[in-house]
Image (cartoon, rainbow, N blue to C red):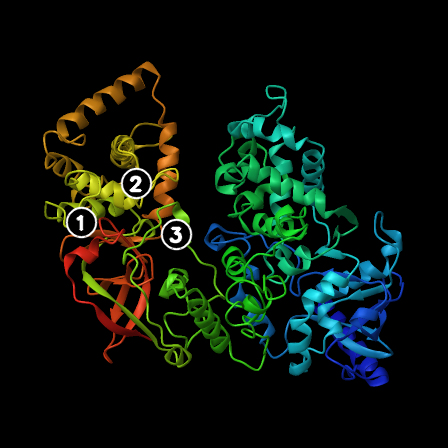
């Protein structure tokens, strides 16, 4: 500790001496909004202070330059050291943590560089990136020219808000003008060699062979059984997972930086490789759906890794996966920089701003306003919202985050003449930005779970084709005037899986809700005849969609029966299981929290495929096939996926006073109201306020009223305000 203190004191003394001798760098104003600064980095040795120079050019007349893409904060994945800390291995790049770091009095840890004889403070990771550029001549496959680079933190005067507004608005033009982009992922670590082995091996495969790679062949140790399977070990894949979870992949600005790059080179320490190699690896895991396997929650159970984890012991204790962020990042680059579109005279059609915000909602930024501004340079200006609001969302860092997000929501709703954006409002428990109207999505947080419209081709129109009469003046004031119908009040809710230590408690609450339904089920039936309680339950839990088919085929009900059988076996045997002997290791489950499946099944009509007699027949068949060694619950994997996406884990099941069953946000509670709003697509859970207005709690699925059936109930149309 004393030695560290002496070193820190010496460092502070040196910094003070440099500051006294050289002084701090002061930016000169840019001559015009179309000018940019370029950074010239001078060669230097490893241990000397970095020296550079900033020069001003008109963008159209600028000399050859490349842009640097990096993350302002730390560049490495921080592996959790205990299971309690493992909620998400890459949380270091979430908006809250980055924002807290940059809003602290001292900001992130910084280092000095010398620019035109004056000192500039930069983050440690940028310092490392600049040192890499200064020694680029010694790195293989790195371009030896130009010596000019565009680096956002240095080429823009971050303290000059008007300049920052102009420069951010033109960043897309800067990246289009640049000769290419150099991606700095940070220094190497002990996992980098495995990551490179993975990417090089996949890069050598023929894309035409990918459809022949079996889904389950990922778990085979040798590639000889399947010619098309790349011969990679689990360790190689773990290294790739660590690399792909570096903070750079979660940064919001990299979407534009990589998408507009004429060419891209990736640098990790002294390892240099083309983006195309990384791109092909991401395309491979998507095409083969191997990203389902690339999760430490699955890999940690493999015998090989349990016996010999090697350097990945801490990695396997962390919740790490490939995830969708790098996959979507790669897709956006391919969409924008891909082959020309013949229908557009060889041009490439940029994505809409709405699509960009949806796909990259999970990205992080130190300034929450950049969750909007970072995509303006990529978006198609001929599409909404710019088609009707051409000057909307111009970068202005004088505006508050609340103002930027509210304006984004307003112009989207106005340009689409739709309330569909309400489905992108996150659960109230997840919101971070205070003081925003409840109808405005908080773009600073990832949306989890994703909106129900991504479930499949349901084309839900709960309010039919009823039009919405908007009042944009009131929207600017934070008030959303809507029209619709009050369907019912919520009077019963389920327990979520993470709200009880006993896994059967959640299912017990679901069965209890189902038993409380009055039969016949209310509302017109779309399936021929009135559904039974069991059918209402499984169709609600799957949002009546299975494998993108709507309505879900009746055969899914038979799968659900098998699912119940497996649940009962698991719930009843769990307290008695043990490695050494078949002895009770816990207290037996209380009947009060054990699902009353028998009671529910006994209430089914005799001709129901879910009646108790047929259930017993299926139970006998399953047990017999278990004895014969022929039973496999593999088909339940797809059903489990559907349940995970539509209910159970992240959405709360509810029952209304009138006997409807549905799923909604986890924050819903008894007393909340279910509304059918014009041009909203789905029903919504609203909470009445003392002032007579309502607050959005979130979207919902209500079985039996998703296709305009509520319009046949003669509910009075009402005009209400959401604040």
Q: Quadrant of residue 552?
A: top left
Quadrant in which the N terminus is drawn? bottom right
Q: Residue at x 64, y 40 (%)?
A: 281
Say whether disc 3 or disc 1 marks the residue closer to the N-terminus: 3
Q: Residue at x 63, y 20 (%)?
A: 224
Q: Is residue 128 visible?
A: no
The image position of residue 89, as x and y in percent, is 54, 53
Circle 2 packing at 10 Å, graded few (<14), some (14-19), many (20+), is some
Residue furthest out toward the top: 628
663 versus 437 height, above or below: above
Q: Residue at x 30, y 28 (%)?
A: 582
Q: Which residue is mark 3?
A: 453
The image position of residue 90, as x and y in percent, is 55, 55
Circle 1 packing at 10 Å, graded few (<14), some (14-19), many (20+), is many
The image position of residue 686, as x and y in percent, is 27, 66
At mark 2, the secondary structure is loop
Q: Which residue is mark 1?
A: 513
Q: Is residue 437 visible?
A: yes
């Amino acid at each position: 500790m004393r030695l560290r203190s002496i070193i820190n004191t010496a460092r502070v003394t040196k910094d003070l001496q440099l500051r006294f001798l050289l002084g701090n760098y002061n930016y000169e104003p840019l001559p015009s909004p179309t000018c940019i600064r370029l950074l010239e980095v001078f060669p230097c040795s490893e241990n000397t202070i970095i020296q550079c120079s900033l020069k001003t050019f008109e963008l159209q007349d600028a000399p050859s330059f490349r842009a640097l893409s990096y993350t302002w904060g730390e560049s490495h994945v921080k592996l959790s050291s205990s299971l309690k800390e493992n909620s998400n291995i890459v949380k270091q790049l979430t908006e809250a943590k980055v924002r807290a770091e940059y809003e602290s009095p001292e900001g992130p840890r910084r280092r000095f560089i010398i620019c035109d004889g004056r000192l500039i403070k930069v983050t440690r990771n940028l310092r490392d990136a600049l040192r890499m550029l200064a020694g680029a001549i010694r790195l293989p496959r790195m371009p030896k020219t130009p010596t000019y680079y565009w680096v956002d933190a240095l080429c823009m005067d971050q303290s000059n808000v008007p300049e920052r507004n102009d420069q951010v608005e033109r960043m897309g033009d800067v990246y289009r003008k640049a000769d290419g982009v150099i991606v700095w992922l940070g220094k190497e670590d002990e996992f980098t060699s495995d990551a490179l082995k993975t990417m090089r091996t996949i890069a050598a495969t023929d894309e035409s062979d990918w459809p022949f790679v079996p889904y389950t062949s990922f778990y085979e140790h040798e590639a000889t059984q399947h010619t098309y399977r790349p011969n990679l070990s689990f360790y190689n894949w773990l290294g790739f997972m660590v690399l792909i979870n570096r903070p750079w992949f979660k940064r919001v600005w990299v979407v534009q930086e990589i998408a507009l790059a004429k060419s891209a080179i990736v640098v990790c320490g002294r390892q240099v490789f083309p983006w195309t190699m990384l791109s092909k690896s991401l395309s491979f895991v998507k095409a083969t759906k191997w990203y389902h396997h690339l999760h430490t929650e699955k890999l940690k159970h493999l015998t090989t890794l349990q016996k010999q984890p090697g350097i990945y012991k801490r990695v396997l204790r962390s919740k790490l996966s490939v995830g969708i962020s790098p996959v979507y990042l790669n897709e956006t680059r391919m969409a924008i920089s891909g082959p020309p579109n013949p229908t557009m005279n060889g041009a490439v059609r940029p994505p809409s701003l709405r699509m960009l915000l949806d796909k990259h909602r999970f990205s992080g930024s130190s300034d929450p306003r950049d969750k909007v501004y970072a995509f303006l340079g990529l978006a198609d200006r001929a599409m909404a919202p710019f088609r009707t609001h051409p000057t909307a969302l111009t970068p202005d860092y004088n505006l508050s985050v609340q103002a930027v997000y509210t304006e984004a929501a307003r112009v989207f709703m106005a340009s689409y003449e739709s309330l569909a954006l309400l489905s992108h409002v996150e659960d109230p428990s997840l919101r971070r930005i205070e003081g925003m109207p409840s109808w405005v999505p908080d773009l600073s947080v990832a949306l989890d779970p994703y909106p129900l419209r991504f479930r499949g081709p349901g084309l839900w129109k709960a309010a039919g084709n009823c039009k919405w009469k908007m009042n944009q003046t009131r929207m600017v004031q934070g008030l959303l005037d809507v029209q619709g119908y009050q369907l019912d009040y919520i009077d019963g809710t389920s327990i979520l899986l993470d709200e009880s230590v006993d896994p059967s408690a959640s299912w017990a609450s679901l069965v209890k809700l189902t038993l409380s339904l009055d039969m016949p089920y209310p509302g017109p039936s779309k399936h021929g005849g009135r559904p039974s309680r069991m059918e209402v339950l499984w169709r609600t839990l799957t949002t009546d969609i299975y494998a993108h088919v709507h309505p879900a085929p009746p055969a899914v009900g038979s799968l659900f029966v098998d699912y119940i059988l497996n649940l009962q076996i698991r719930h009843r045997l769990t307290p008695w299981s043990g490695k050494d002997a078949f002895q009770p290791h816990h207290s037996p489950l209380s009947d009060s929290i054990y699902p009353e499946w028998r009671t529910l099944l006994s209430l089914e009509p005799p001709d129901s495929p879910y009646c108790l007699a047929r259930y017993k027949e299926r139970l006998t068949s399953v047990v017999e096939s278990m004895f014969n060694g022929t039973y496999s619950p593999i088909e339940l994997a797809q059903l489990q996926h559907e349940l995970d996406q539509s209910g159970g884990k992240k959405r709360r099941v509810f029952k209304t006073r009138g006997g409807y069953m549905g799923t909604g946000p986890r924050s819903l509670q008894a007393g909340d109201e279910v509304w059918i709003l014009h041009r909203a697509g789905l029903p919504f859970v609203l909470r009445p306020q003392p002032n007579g207005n309502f607050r959005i709690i979130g979207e919902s699925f209500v079985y039996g009223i998703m296709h305009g059936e509520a319009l046949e109930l003669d509910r009075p149309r009402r005009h209400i305000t959401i604040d």
